[in-house]
Image (tube, rainbow, N blue to C red):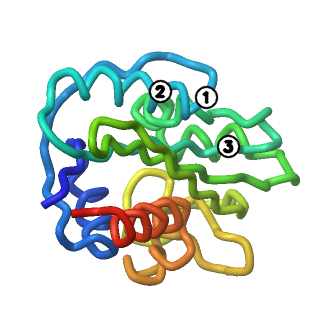
């Protein structure tokens, strides 16, 4: 078993579709305010590495809306809790440039060493919320080359093209090559 440290059950279920042997460990840890997702992950890996025996992964994601100078970016979780998708759509109300990038950084503690795996998904912000699947910003993000939001896709469809799916496949390939 390989553990994912998260309290987001939706994220855990989505991740298990790619790495079925993942086990969820619901544990709180401080999330620093930093300029990049990589810095947040580095801090968390070091903090948790001192508290948890064995190997584990953590992840952090951000939605970078280019017309808003890449806001909310590293603050995506806080912004979602504060203004939600409705607030983002209000900020984008009169904006024609709707390009955005979703980014996930998965941090892994493996054999006492830290590793990072990055996944990106380019797309755009929808003009309204659509779909019932997924979580977070899924109802307002349309991946490049598609007309549907992540929330209008099945988990399997989303995992094939999403930022988290891309990063997780890198983790899975690493574990296949070097793992237990």
Quadrant in the picture for the C terminus: bottom left
Seen in the picture, residue 69 relative to 167 is either above or below; the reply is above
Badge 3 vs badge 1, beta-carbon distance below 8 Å: no
Residue annotated with mark 1: 36
- Cα separation, mark 2 vs mark 1, equals 7 Å
Disc 3 element: strand
Disc 1 element: loop
Q: Nearer the viewer, residue 129 or 71?
A: 71
Q: Is 131 displayed left or right of 161 in the figure? A: left
Badge 2 or badge 3: first in the primary sequence: 2
Seen in the picture, residue 162 relative to 73 is either above or below; the reply is below
Disc 2 element: helix
Q: Residue at x 72, y 72 (%)?
A: 144
Estimate the x, y position of residue 50 in percent, counting from the top left: 21, 21
Estimate the x, y position of residue 35 in percent, counting from the top left: 63, 21
Badge 2 vs badge 1, beta-carbon distance below 8 Å: yes
- Disc sitting over residue 40 in the figure: 2
């Amino acid at each position: 078993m390989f553990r994912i440290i998260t309290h987001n059950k939706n994220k855990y279920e989505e991740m298990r579709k790619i790495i079925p042997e993942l086990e969820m460990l619901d544990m709180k840890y401080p999330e620093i305010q930093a300029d990049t997702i990589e810095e947040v992950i580095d801090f968390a890996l070091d903090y948790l590495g001192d508290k948890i025996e064995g190997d584990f992964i953590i992840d952090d994601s951000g939605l970078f809306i280019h017309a808003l100078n890449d806001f909310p970016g590293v603050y995506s979780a806080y912004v979602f809790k504060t203004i939600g998708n409705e607030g983002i759509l209000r900020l984008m109300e009169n904006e024609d440039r709707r390009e955005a990038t979703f980014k996930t950084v998965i941090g892994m503690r493996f054999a006492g060493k830290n590793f990072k795996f990055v996944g990106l998904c380019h797309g755009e912000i929808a003009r309204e919320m659509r779909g019932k699947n997924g979580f977070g910003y899924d109802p307002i993000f349309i991946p490049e080359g598609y007309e549907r939001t992540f929330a209008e896709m099945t988990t399997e469809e989303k995992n094939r093209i999403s930022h988290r799916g891309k990063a997780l496949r890198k983790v899975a390939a690493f574990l296949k090559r070097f793992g237990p």
